[in-house]
């Protein structure tokens, strides 16, 4: 299993929303609802299979939900089909408009039957409330771990809706409500960098890039549109350069979330190109699964090619992701990043700053307390904090260390986000020797970043540093979430290790006068 910031995939090859319907055919004998090529590939071989976008209620969209067509009615069915999907200009144009059976029927009719697959459930709604309701429905039917993620389709042209207007609300409300990691699907036709920043800020686990590109084809004789919805969505080979551009630009803009790339992918070389551009996983869409009708006769050959592609990606050495060019950010990008930081500070403050009268471990009284377990135990917030910490790690970090107890979830979350091993440090067991005080595997000479939750006097960080150094670690950086500005910076300055706190108490809205005069114990 591969872990992309909480999205657990069997490998880096997934399938794009809808191309394999709901992951199984509607009827045992007819491949209705998913590409006929699917019967030639064991679908459990994929990293995950993404469903068609599901809405709260069944929707005809621009096609039909009927599946009892008589033979004599086939011409009419084909006519409808051609108005929803056609081969065009080196790719495909579709406009199904979220034609789907609705989320409850999906769980009734398909969920158990597809239990062998790793699944991503695609959800579509027109408001934050609808997305919350969809997420609640998934929560009700799927235990954590039963699906890899839910994917928010906030980028489909065929439903004629300005998703960019509701994006922030949808993500702010529905991501924390989800028991499953959330992937946000981006459109190449709107400001995808801004959308990815919102996704990152609101705690999404990953983004999918890209949804199909808005397009138009008209009959040259009559001027009639090919698609029933007038405009359509272009996919396949024709849009591969656009997909690559979007992935690359997201990385250039400093987006650190895992990217699942989909646009025109058919061969191993396509996958390699996307990995070079900055993708973490690749998704097979229309270029793989759709063919002009006679092309489906070659299904067994297609199947063999797809199985080989999965094996090639599994055994490939993947290119190193190009670094974001954060040092070259434009003024607007810097302003946006600052807004992200401020927003995270506000979220941490809201979750973790307690006002009142508190006796700290040292016996000192303080009128505020930072409850680190609040940002260490809420998945959406923890993911954002971990991403922010991960951005501070030196490029050559080999291992992250977290001190018991508060920094353990932080270290593990960063470890998952960056695919780095973690070790856990237990200062209380220092006297029992390094082998007891460090959990996990740490080879001498390993380049370590030490993660702290709240730094007060810096004492806990100094103890952890001492333990790590005794074990031979090369500690390169200490990253804390909050510095209470009570001596920690000065204490750590003497260690020769670079130290950075994401926030000071002041950033969390706490005035210095509120801090206790004597300062609490290192353990906060
Ligand atoms: C026939 C068809 C139906 C699609 N339906 C959905 C959908 O329900 N939800 C969604 O998020 N994307 C949908 N897509 C978009 C694909 O998942 C994918 O993002 C897009 O086609 C670009 O990738 P590709 O060029 O590899 O096909 C659909 C694409 C096609 C061709």
Image (spheres, grey):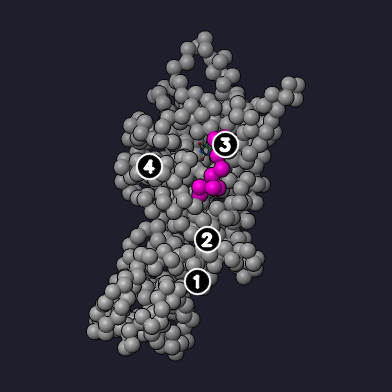
Could you tell me how far apart the alpha carbons at marks 2 and 1 are, in whole angstroms? 12 Å
Residue 258 vs 38, above or below: the answer is below
Asked if residue 338 can be seen in this view, the reply is: yes
Task: Determine the residue located farthest toward the top in the rendered image.
Answer: 72
Could you tell me how far apart the alpha carbons at marks 4 and 1 are, in whole angstroms? 36 Å
Disc 3: which residue: 160
For marks 2 and 1 on the same chain, the one whose residue lies earlier in the sequence: 2
Q: Quadrant of ligand 1?
A: top right
Determine the secondary structure under disc 3: loop
Determine the secondary structure under disc 2: loop
Circle nearer the viewer, 3 or 2: 3
**Residue at coordinates 47% horizontally, 12% vertically from top-left?**
70
Could you tell me how far apart the alpha carbons at marks 3 and 2 are, in whole angstroms? 30 Å
Residues marked 4 and 3 touching at CB (< 8 Å): no
Disc 4: which residue: 133
Residue 35: x and y in percent read 51, 30
- Disc 2 crowd rating (10 Å Cα; few below 14, some 14-19, many 20+) is many
Disc 1: which residue: 392
The verdict on label 3 being within 8 Å of ligand 1 is: no
Task: Determine the residue located farthest toward the right in the rendered image.
Answer: 221
User: What stretch of residues is rendered in magenta?
Assistant: 158-167
Q: Which mark is residue 98?
A: none
For marks 2 and 4 on the same chain, the one whose residue lies earlier in the sequence: 4
Pick whichever, 165 or 439, lies toward us. Answer: 165
Could you tell me how far apart the alpha carbons at marks 2 and 4 are, in whole angstroms? 29 Å
For marks 3 and 2 on the same chain, the one whose residue lies earlier in the sequence: 3
For marks 4 and 1 on the same chain, the one whose residue lies earlier in the sequence: 4
For marks 1 and 3 on the same chain, the one whose residue lies earlier in the sequence: 3
Circle nearer the viewer, 2 or 4: 4
Q: Which mark is residue 256?
A: 2
Residues marked 3 and 2 touching at CB (< 8 Å): no
């Amino acid at each position: 299993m591969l872990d992309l910031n909480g999205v657990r995939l069997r490998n880096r090859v997934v399938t794009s929303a809808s191309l394999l319907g709901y992951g199984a055919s509607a009827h045992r004998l007819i491949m209705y609802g998913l590409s006929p090529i699917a019967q030639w590939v064991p679908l459990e071989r994929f990293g995950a299979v993404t469903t068609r976008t599901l809405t709260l209620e069944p929707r005809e969209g621009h096609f039909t939900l009927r599946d009892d067509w008589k033979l004599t009615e086939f011409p009419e069915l084909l006519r409808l089909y051609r108005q929803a999907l056609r081969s065009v200009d080196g790719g495909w144009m579709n406009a199904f408009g979220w034609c789907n059976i609705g989320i409850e029927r999906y769980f009734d009719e398909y969920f158990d039957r597809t239990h062998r697959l790793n699944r991503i459930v695609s959800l579509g709604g027109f408001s934050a409330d609808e997305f919350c309701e969809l997420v609640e429905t998934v929560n009700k039917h799927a235990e954590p771990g039963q699906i890899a993620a839910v994917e928010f389709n906030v980028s489909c042209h065929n439903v004629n809706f300005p998703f960019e207007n509701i994006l922030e609300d949808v993500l702010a409300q529905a991501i924390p409500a989800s028991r499953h990691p959330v992937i946000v699907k981006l459109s190449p036709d709107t400001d995808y960098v801004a959308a990815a920043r919102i996704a990152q800020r609101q705690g999404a686990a990953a983004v999918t890039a890209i949804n199909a590109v808005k397009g138009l084809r008209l009959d040259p004789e009559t001027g009639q549109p090919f698609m029933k919805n007038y405009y359509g969505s272009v996919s396949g080979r024709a849009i591969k350069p656009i997909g690559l551009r979007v992935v690359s630009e997201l990385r250039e803009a400093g987006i650190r979330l895992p990217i699942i790339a989909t646009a025109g992918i058919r061969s191993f070389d396509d996958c390699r190109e996307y990995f070079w551009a900055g993708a973490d996983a690749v998704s097979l869409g229309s270029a793989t699964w759709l063919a002009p009708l006679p092309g489906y006769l070659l299904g067994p050959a297609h199947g063999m090619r797809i199985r080989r592609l999965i094996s090639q990606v599994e055994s490939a050495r993947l290119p190193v992701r190009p670094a974001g060019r954060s040092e070259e950010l434009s003024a607007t990008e810097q302003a946006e990043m600052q807004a992200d930081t401020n927003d995270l500070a506000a979220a941490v403050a809201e979750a973790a700053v307690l006002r009142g009268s508190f006796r700290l471990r040292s016996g000192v009284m303080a009128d505020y307390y930072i409850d680190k377990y609040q940002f260490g135990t809420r998945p959406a917030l923890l993911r954002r904090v971990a991403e922010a910490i991960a951005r501070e790690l030196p490029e050559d970090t080999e291992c992250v260390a977290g001190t018991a107890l508060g920094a353990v979830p932080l270290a593990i979350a960063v470890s998952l986000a960056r695919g780095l091993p973690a070790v856990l440090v237990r200062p209380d067991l220092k006297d029992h020797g390094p082998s007891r005080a460090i959990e996990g595997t740490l080879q001498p000479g390993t380049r370590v970043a030490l993660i702290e939750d709240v730094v007060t006097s810096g004492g806990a960080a100094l103890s952890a540093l001492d333990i790590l150094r005794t074990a031979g670690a090369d500690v390169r950086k200490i990253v804390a979430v909050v510095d209470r500005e009570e001596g920690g910076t000065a204490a750590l300055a003497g260690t020769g290790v670079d130290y950075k706190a994401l926030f000071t108490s002041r950033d969390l809205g706490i005035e210095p006068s509120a801090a206790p005069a004597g300062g609490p114990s290192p353990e906060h």
